[in-house]
Image (tube, rainbow, N blue to C red):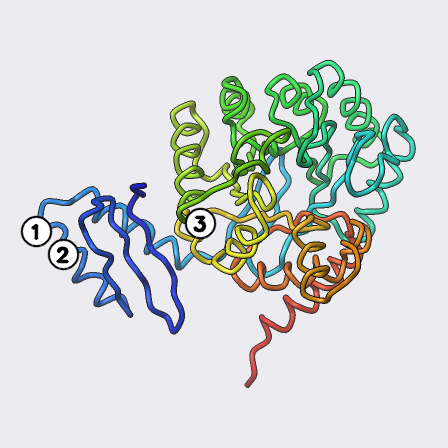
């Protein structure tokens, strides 16, 4: 498989430059001066596009701070890790057993609780996307999410971000009309050809998530030559697709899609190599919370008799979250807001502390 030009961040501050030409061996550089020499040589060889692409990605590697803004609301990313609290409005949620399904009052109470606990974004979804999940109709999804979004805005105000977790353009459009601010699309705008048009028309932030396959079959026969490079290629393609439909570059948030068409080893490798996603020059969101790969690792490496249930995966979720944040994640999507906020407060404080 041929990739775009790419920069792999390796140990000991060494960078591996990969070229679109499959016959061009990777080049290793250790600093900016060596990188500039490679770029100069590429230009002399007439490979101007590759030189331009690598230069842009090199610059992006230095970016750490971003801002999300919509309808007068702002969220600064980089120093403090933002938290996205999950509200599932499905009867078959893998994590909470559907306790908020069909109960608007209880859903609003949960949102209020997450905001009090420190959530920056509330992610509301009306269709389960766990492995093997059966799709629901647009009408059913609207019936689940719209009354809650309307009630949340009426009861709790408009000074916080709401994201709508959907891959359907009609659901996204209605949600944005009723007060949502961000579209969180697990398909990265690849399932519904109208989604990019909706995002462009509302000029709202959009999460481009990677998925291989569809939820009902995404864990079957999964294979990657290089999971990180393939995920980055997909996201780059979808960003270009979105921009052709009028979406501004600074509206994109990227999500490598932990658990979406990936086995345990793929999820671990993505978290381990998360720094490489910095080449995209965009904020990174990651959803680790309670995912099945955490349970599998705990069971297999600790010799437990059975896989811990989703609500018993908090410690594992926070362990993986720590590595993700230290490798560049800006937003953490979680079911356990209070514990995650407290954990990240300590992590952000210690990593930002300067010894004088």
Query: Which of 234/107 is in front?
Result: 234
**Label 2 secondary element:** helix
| Residue at figure coordinates x 70%, y 30% from the top left | 133
Mark 1: secondary structure: helix
Labels 1 and 2 touching (C-beta < 8 A)? yes
Observer-nearest of 147 and 136: 136
C-alpha distance separating marks 1 and 2: 6 Å
How far is the residue under mark 3 from the one under mark 2? Answer: 27 Å
- Examine the rendered structure and indicate whether residue 315 appears above or below residue 164: below
Alpha carbons under labels 3 and 1: distance apart = 30 Å
Which mark identifies residue 40?
A: 2
Q: Residue at x 66, y 59 (%)?
A: 297
Query: Of the residues under marks 3 and 2, which one precedes in the sequence?
Result: 2
* SS for dot 3: helix
Q: Which mark is residue 169?
A: none
C-beta proximity under 8 Å, tags 3 and 2: no
- Classify residue 34 as left or right of residue 284: left
Give percent across and percent down for residue 280. 41, 47
Q: What residue occupies the far bottom of the structure in this picture?
A: 356
Residue in the image at 59% along x and 46% along y: 258
Picture coordinates of residue 196, whole percent (x, y): 50, 24
Of the numbered discs 3 and 1, the one sitting upstream in the chain is: 1
- How far across and down, in percent of the image, does residue 2 sit? 29, 41
Q: Residues within 10 Å of mark 2 (few under 14, many from 20)?
A: some
Residue on which the image places disc 1: 44
92 relative to 61 in the view: left or right: right
Q: Residues within 10 Å of mark 3 (few under 14, many from 20)?
A: many
Q: Are marks 3 and 1 in contact (CB under 8 Å)?
A: no
Q: Which mark is residue 228?
A: 3
């Amino acid at each position: 498989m041929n990739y775009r030009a790419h920069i792999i961040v390796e140990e000991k501050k060494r960078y591996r430059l990969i070229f679109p030409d499959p016959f061009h061996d990777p080049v290793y550089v250790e600093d900016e001066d060596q990188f500039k020499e490679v770029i100069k040589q590429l230009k002399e060889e007439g490979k101007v596009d590759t030189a331009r692409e690598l230069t842009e990605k090199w610059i992006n590697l230095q970016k750490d701070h971003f801002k999300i803004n919509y309808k007068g609301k702002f969220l600064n990313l980089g120093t403090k890790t933002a938290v996205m609290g999950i509200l599932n409005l499905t009867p078959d949620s893998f994590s909470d057993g559907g306790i908020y399904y069909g109960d608007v009052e209880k859903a609003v109470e949960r949102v209020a609780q997450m905001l009090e606990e420190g959530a920056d974004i509330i992610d509301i979804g009306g269709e389960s996307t766990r492995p093997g999940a059966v799709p629901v109709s647009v009408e059913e999804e609207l019936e689940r999410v719209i009354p809650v979004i309307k009630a949340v805005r009426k009861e709790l105000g408009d000074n916080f971000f709401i994201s709508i977790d959907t891959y359907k353009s009609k659901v996204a459009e209605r949600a944005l009309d009723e007060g949502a601010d961000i579209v969180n699309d697990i398909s990265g705008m690849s399932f519904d050809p109208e989604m990019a048009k909706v995002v462009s028309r509302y000029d709202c932030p959009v999460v481009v998530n990677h998925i291989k396959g569809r939820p009902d079959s995404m864990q079957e026969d999964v294979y990657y030559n290089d999971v990180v490079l393939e995920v980055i290629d997909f996201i780059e393609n979808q960003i270009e697709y979105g921009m052709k439909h009028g979406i501004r570059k600074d509206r994109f948030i990227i999500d490598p899609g932990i658990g979406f068409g990936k086995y345990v080893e793929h999820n671990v490798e993505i978290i381990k190599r998360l720094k490489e996603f910095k080449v995209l020059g965009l904020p990174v969101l990651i959803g680790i919370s309670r995912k099945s790969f955490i349970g599998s690792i705990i069971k297999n490496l600790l010799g437990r008799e059975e896989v811990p249930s989703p609500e018993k995966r908090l410690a594992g979720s926070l362990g993986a979250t720590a590595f993700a944040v230290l490798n560049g994640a800006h937003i953490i999507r979680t079911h356990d807001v209070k514990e995650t906020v407290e954990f990240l407060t300590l992590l952000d404080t210690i990593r930002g502390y300067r010894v004088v």
